[in-house]
Image (spheres, rainbow, N blue to C red):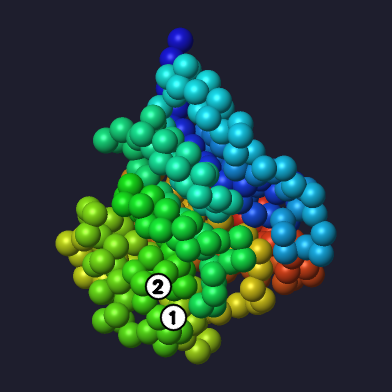
């Protein structure tokens, strides 16, 4: 019997037991969109690092053996999605995963999680930034925020970046091959814009009204919806619109329920809207 009779997505990310981020949100979203989510954890957290305290275990030493068992099973994936990585060694392991499991029919989605608001995360080093530059060459779809796009293209962060400069950044990121890119989280007054770039098409902005507070895990939710849409054959710009709308509606519901910002977005009641 084959293990490959249903669409599957490999998700390489950390696992947080509480706080709605990473694998914890990506697994139910992809399941609702009609595919099997197969997680490869990079670390396991009791709750994410945005809380005052947490306990965690690094999974790096187990990742190679984990991947080897999947290879024995001859698992084949319609998409591979990578998110937050905790070390340069993990970046190398993700590249190894692509070597083992990426086929011409596999959509590679890389969320190059490195920083926000113009600042590199404390866990990231210049060596890791260079490693991510190598990893993104393997991607078919890239989902950086503005900070990450600037880091990948060695530009100074400018929150008021022009549309022309956004296009130049995307063109640079496509030098290793045609990619679909969304630069997310561009604040323009009361709106939140996402710049959508796709080879052979006119770039465009997908806009949602800015609602609620900044919350943990929104990028993971955003990336999961885009990944699921890619597997389901949805047009890229439409997938960004669906992801943006889903995040915005989930934030509104979180505010209605009085959910603390550390606890992420209450997307569970809206999962039914993602069912194909």
For image coordinates 36% across by 77% down, the residue present is 155
Which SS class for mark 2?
helix
Q: Which residue appears at 39% of the width and 30% of the height?
A: 100
Instruction: Give the residue at x 46% y 84%.
Output: 159
Q: Which residue is mark 2?
A: 150
Q: Which residue is mark 1?
A: 157
Give the residue furthest to the front: 127
Q: Is residue 145 above or below residue 111?
A: below
Q: Where does residue 75 sit, x and y in percent of width and height?
A: 44, 24
In the picture shown, does residue 38 fall above or below 116?
above
What is the x, y in percent for residue 59?
Answer: 64, 38
Q: Earlier in the sequence, mark 2 or mark 1?
A: 2
- The answer to whether residue 56 is visible is yes
Local crowd size for mark 1, using a 10 Å CA cut-off: few (<14), some (14–19), many (≥20)? some
The correct choice, above or below, for 142 with respect to 72 in the image is below
Front residue of 221/96: it is: 96
Q: How many marks?
A: 2
Left or right position of 82 against 48:
left
Front-most of residues 173 and 234: 173
* Element class at badge 1: loop
Circles 2 and 1: CB atoms closer than 8 Å: yes
**Left or right placement of residue 29 versus residue 170 in this view:** right
Give the alpha-carbon distance from disc 2 to disc 1, as whole Å: 6 Å
């Amino acid at each position: 019997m084959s293990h490959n009779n249903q669409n599957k997505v490999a998700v390489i990310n950390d696992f947080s037991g509480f706080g709605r981020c990473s694998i914890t949100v990506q697994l139910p979203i992809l399941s609702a969109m009609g595919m099997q989510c197969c997680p490869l954890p990079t670390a396991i957290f009791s709750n994410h690092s945005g809380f005052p305290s947490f306990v965690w275990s690094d999974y790096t030493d187990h990742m190679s053996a984990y991947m080897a068992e999947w290879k024995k099973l001859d698992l084949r994936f319609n998409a591979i999605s990578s998110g937050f990585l905790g070390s340069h060694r993990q970046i190398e392991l993700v590249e190894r995963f692509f070597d083992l499991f990426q086929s011409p029919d596999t959509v590679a989605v890389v969320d190059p999680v490195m920083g926000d608001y113009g600042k590199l995360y404390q866990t990231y080093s210049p060596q890791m930034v260079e490693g991510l530059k190598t990893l993104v060459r393997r991607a078919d779809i890239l989902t950086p925020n503005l900070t990450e796009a600037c880091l990948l293209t060695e530009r100074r962060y400018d929150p008021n970046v022009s549309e022309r400069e956004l296009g130049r950044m995307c063109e640079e990121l496509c030098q290793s091959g045609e990619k679909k890119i969304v630069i997310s989280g561009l604040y323009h007054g009361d709106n939140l814009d996402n710049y959508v770039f796709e080879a052979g098409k006119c770039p465009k902005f997908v806009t949602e009204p800015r609602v609620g507070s900044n919350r943990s895990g929104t990028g993971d939710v955003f990336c999961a919806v885009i990944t699921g849409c890619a597997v389901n054959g949805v047009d890229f710009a439409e997938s960004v619109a669906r992801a943006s709308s889903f995040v915005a509606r989930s934030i509104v519901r979180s505010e209605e329920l009085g959910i603390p910002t550390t606890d992420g977005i209450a997307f569970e009641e809206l999962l039914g809207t993602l069912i194909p």
